[in-house]
Amino acid sequence: MAIDSEADTLELPPVPEFGSGRPRVAAQRIHPRRLGRGHLKLYARLRAWTIAEDHPSRGTAVAVRASGLTAGALLLWRTANEQPRMLGVAAGLYAIQAWRAGRPVPITEDELKRRVLLGVQHLIGDRPGIFLRDLYDEFQARPAAAHLDDARLRAVLLHSGITIHKSVRIGDQTGRSGIKAADITALLSPNPPNAPEPPVDAGHAPAEGAAKPA
């Protein structure tokens, strides 16, 4: 699967963060959130720089950096009073930096599959499964997957390792193809630990291939 870090459909599964609605409207909601993410990242960097956790002389570094920030804040306040236009320029430059910092990080194919599984699990909820037709309708009602038709959605599900059963039973309804919640849980669960080796009786050699004790 080709993954574009700038695509508005990067979040393939129906992540609640992006809500529902028409794709064009939802895409406009993504941009302010990108600015918000960028602002939080810049704030975290500034905070980490100010508290100087890894600095060998932390006390001195914090005092010097706090003094610099105070001087910068006073200079900014004075500039805003004398030249208000410069404040707008500074805000614009900060918005550009926040936009760059909030750029989505390209995700791996395994992470994309995991998000698809989480999306299907979110749609199933507490039910034992979901019919395939209902799953298609739920996916396509969300902007992240509205551009996918039934055939492409089926290909995404199969590529993510999801088994599509010819007949599942949900409540009183049966005889329709669908996905079982147990299959999604198994795919999201970590691999079970290896079974312990059987004990060896005293005076008997360990089985062939068994690990020798340290």
Image: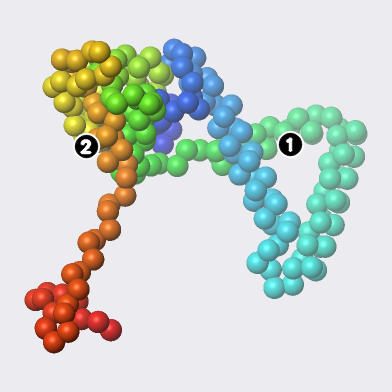
Q: Which residue lies under the disc numbered 2?
A: 161
Report whether 42 appears left or right of 76.
left
Report whether 118 appears left or right of 78.
left
Image quadrant where residue 187 sits? top left
Q: How is the image coloured?
A: rainbow
| Residue farthest to the front, as pictured | 202
Q: Is residue 13 visible?
A: no
| Residue farthest to the bottom, as pictured | 203
Report whether 36 appears left or right of 81.
left
| Residue farthest to the left, as pictured | 208
Q: Position of residue 116 (x, y in %)?
A: 33, 32
Residue at 80 percent of width and 29 percent of height: 85
Q: Position of residue 134 (x, y in %)?
A: 29, 15
Q: Are marks 2 and 1 in contact (CB under 8 Å)?
A: no
Q: Measured along the vertical axis of the image, is residue 115 above or below residue 20? A: below
Q: Secondary structure at mark 2?
A: loop
Of callouts 2 and 1, the N-terminal one:
1
Which of labels 2 and 1 is toward the front?
A: 2
Q: Secondary structure at mark 1?
A: helix
Image quadrant where residue 12 sits? top left
In the image, which disc is placed on residue 214? none
Tell me the quarter of the image containing the N terminus.
Answer: top left
Residue at 20 percent of width and 69 percent of height: 197
Q: Position of residue 99 (x, y in %)?
A: 58, 35
Q: Which residue lies under the disc numbered 1?
A: 90
Q: Measured along the vertical axis of the image, is residue 46 above or below residue 165? A: below
Q: Position of residue 173 (x, y in %)?
A: 23, 13
Residue at 27 percent of width and 53 percent of height: 192
Q: CA distance from mark 2 to mark 1?
A: 49 Å
Badge 2 amino acid: Gly
Tell which of 120 and 77 is nearer to you: 120
Badge 1 amino acid: Ala
